[in-house]
Image (cartoon, rainbow, N blue to C red):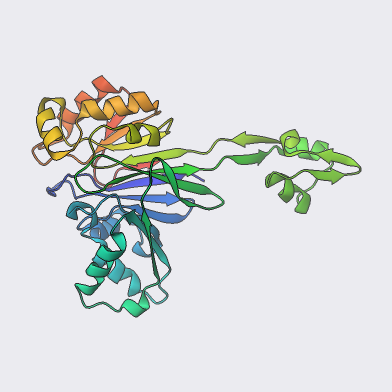
Amino acid sequence: MAIEITMLGTACMVPTKERNVQAIFVDMHGEGLLFDCGEGTQRQMNIAGINRNRVRKIFISHWHGDHVSGLVGLLQTITNSENPQKIIIFGPRETKDRIAYLLRSVSFESNKINLEIRELDPVYVEKAYENEEYYVECAYLEHKPKCLGYSLVEKDKLRIQMPKVKKLGLREGPLLGKLQRGQSVEVKGQTIKPEDVAITQKGKKLTIIMDTRPCENAIELAREADLLICESAYTAEHEEKAISYKHMTTKDAGLIATKAEVKKLIITHFSQRYKTAKELGEEIKTFFPNSETAYDFMKVKL
């Protein structure tokens, strides 16, 4: 199954007519993961045809309003459903307190929500979450408040080659299931190992780097990613502004993608000073040719 990414917001701090503020929805084999939740994210999901009740995990980069101000509305909508599912929110230190403030700021049926909050405080690049299919890594970036970057890493899978299986006299059933899980089996006194009948399909890696200056953690987090989604608020001409506000230019994003040896780069989080992303899009290709500029409702499959 493919990993599908939907860009729900691609603007920097201020939304424009064409661009909402930050949010990225990832369909991970049917599970809904949301990376940041700026103001208006619910409406963006509606337009994109994404059921808001599909969200199971929310990964917060940092607590600037353009990345989190849509959270309370989304949580209220989800709890208004007949059978609210559990939601896990990941974020930097102080996330528990800040979520508590949000929930107290409105009239909210808190007893209806099944919410778990996990604060992350990585020393370097560390795992934030793991299950049988994938894991998520995180690392601190270089921004004014504590800001996390994330990598979503699909685990390698064994793909059974049916012609080889049939040749050895195996049929579908428990033994085939064991091979699929990486276990050896016995058939008519013969030991069959997974590598005898299967090939390894390497999992995909998606890295999301939000507000930051270029830093070593961003490079290591994005190392050999299939896709890097990276903030690029300014063109190289406005480097002084990028330094002042602790953001990146197209040149910075291209340098991270090059050093991390990523396969593809998509830049996002554009300053409202640019009427269109054309200038940023043309410039980023001079720094990293296999790149694109994000736009609201853009969909990408890995």
Q: Nearer the viewer, residue 15 or 222?
A: 222
Q: Nearer the viewer, residue 67 or 162?
A: 67
Snapshot quadrant of residue 57: bottom left
Give me the residue at 41% from left, 56% from top.
Answer: 32
Give me the residue at 25% from left, 71% from top.
Answer: 103
Q: Position of residue 119 (x, y in %)?
A: 36, 57
Q: Is residue 173 left or right of residue 2?
A: right
Give me the residue at 76% from left, 50% from top.
Answer: 172
- Camera sees residue 302: no
Q: Position of residue 199 (x, y in %)?
A: 66, 34
In the rendered image, which quarter contains the C terminus? top left
Q: Position of residue 87 (x, y in %)?
A: 40, 64
Residue positioned most to the front: 123
Give me the residue at 85% from left, 45% from top.
Answer: 186
Residue positioned most to the right: 189
Q: Is residue 159 left or right of residue 190?
A: left
Snapshot quadrant of residue 198: top right
Residue 2 vs 86, above or below: the answer is above
Q: Position of residue 290 (x, y in %)?
A: 34, 25
Q: How many marks?
A: 0
Residue 299 vs 283, above or below: the answer is below
Q: Nearer the viewer, residue 122 or 162?
A: 122
- Camera sees residue 254: yes
